[in-house]
Amino acid sequence: MSVIESLPRVRSPRLPRADALIQWIVPLAIVLVWQTACVTGFVPARVLPAPSDVALAGWKLLLSGELARNIWVSFWRAGVGFVIGGGIGFAFGLANGLSQVSNKLTDTTLQMVRNIPHLALIPLVILWFGIDESAKLFLVALGVFFPIYLNTLHGIRTVDPQLIEMGRIYGMTDGELFRRVIFSGALPSIFVGVRFALGIMWLTLIVAETIAASSGLGYMAMQAREFMQIDVVVLSILIYALLGKLADSASRVLERLTLSWHPAFQKH
Amino acid sequence: MQEALRFLSPDAEPVDRADFIEQARLARRGSQVSRGLPLTIRGLRKSFGDNEVLRGIDLHIPAGQFVAIVGRSGCGKSTLLRLIAGLETIDAGTISFGEETRPEDVRMMFQEPRLLPWARVLSNVEVGLGRGRASSDAQARAEKALGEVGLDDKRGQWPAVLSGGQKQRVALARALVSDPRVLAFDEPLGALDALTRISMQRLLERVWHDQAFTAILVTHDVSEAVALADRVLVVEHGRITHDVNVDIPRPRRRGSPDLAEVEGSILNNLLEGAEDTSDL
């Protein structure tokens, strides 16, 4: 046992902490080059402010409480929209994966709706909901619905039929079969859908907030543009990048927790 | 050995059951009373669309016998096994085990291990308990079954880290854990390398001997059939064409002239059948 366990360590002697730092080398280098270019005057401040100026703008907004409020609003919209759209997508994916009747009834309709770019609905959504919260939630939910629906459906359809047959032979009830075989088998595919959906979630939110909003990160960026505060504009973009990375990391942690059986997620 | 060969016509009188029981006793060297179930099949037919796969099978397997079914691919041997295990519906005829059976009494082992990749080895074995999964001694029984196949130390592993032979042993433990009385094997060693195969054959023979279930092994490997079974059935075009008793005492020595002789005669039968229809 102990010999087997020590094998991976022999193969990869890197420390986990060093491993985690490597991914930040490139972003840090970019910031350094950017700072140098701005300080030396190679890039004029009205084109791109120095990272230090952006940080300063961030500090000021943080002190005034405006930054925290806007981030919270955007975060809330993203989260609620994701839960609503993802939940419905997941439910339809399950229903259509498990039931032929449900699939015949709704799949064609959903596939037609899927081919409409959901951002094309913005004018309609503004007419329906104004620039209210529900407009943003609707767009985010619509955006995340399809990747989660499609990948849940695909995951359930591609569960190894031999395993399902095995489960039936060994007397699993429908509920057990779903829990122990079908859902577990579909999970890797569902996570692919979740990660796609997270990307779409931020994209939708940025667009919705820059077009029609009275709060949030996108609104903050648009306001800053009005007053030529380019440092705040850049700050908003950087925060979007960080939030995107955060959502992705969260889904990776979940993946690692639930898919530890999968050879691709085993820590070696 | 030639006298052991016997042709079976579809309308043959069923041989006296007492004979079979006596044979089974002999095969087991009279060591214990069998826990296995006898199996009687009458006029069994099965078609898939226009393709008639089984064209009238009559067969009696006494309790505790180890029967191997051989035949070329597409002859219907796997379908016969799946019907016995209750995986397909019967078109005509009957299969009876002599008494009322619980689902846990008849277990099947496949060519692929079919382990749940997301369940650890021990929980995979627990799946085999069927309705007994929820009982308090489930874990203890699963551990015991794992011990029987020699994998106690792998209980906490994911199936992905096991070798092909180890996975198949876990599948065997899963089939054994409910103490089945009939165990059907659908080429369970077909995908293993030669050495693993031989040690798995020994394992199969040992658990069959220890647990005294009725074993039905479908294989395309005649030497495997002869090495393991009390009796070898040759299936051709949906019928049992030869029924060969292998009266060679256990433990059998691999490559012994006696085994080779029986193997040779069965292979000859198979090849003759092939020449008749010239579809080799």
Image: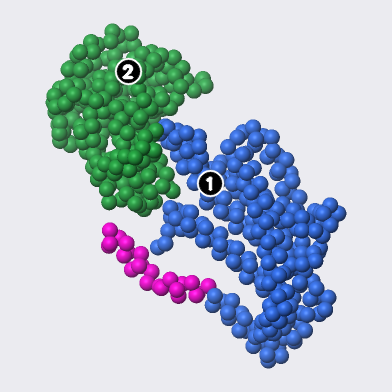
Q: Where residue B233 appears, x then y in whole percent?
A: 29, 22
- Pointer 2: what residue? B99
Residue A20 is situated, as x and y percent measured from the top left of the image, at 48, 72
x, y percent for residue B105: 33, 27
Q: Quadrant of residue B213?
A: top left
Specify the farthest residue to the bottom. A40
Left or right: A217, with A131 as reference point: left
The numbered mark at residue A186 is 1
Mark nearer the viewer, 1 or 2: 2
Observer able to see residue B280: no
Q: Which chain is green?
A: B
Pointer 1 local density, CA inside 10 Å: few below 14, some 14–19, many at least 20: many
**Residue A118 in the image: x percent, y percent?**
75, 53
Q: Is residue A185 left or right of residue B73?
A: right
- Magenta region: A1-23
Local secondary structure at mark 1: helix
Residue type for callout 2: Glu
Say which residue appears at 73% left-offset and 74% top-offset: A66
Question: Is A21 a magenta residue?
Answer: yes
Three-letter amino acid code of the residue under disc 1: Ala
> Is disc 2 on the same chain as disc 1?
no
Q: CA distance from mark 1 to mark 2?
A: 40 Å
Q: Colour of chain A?
A: blue
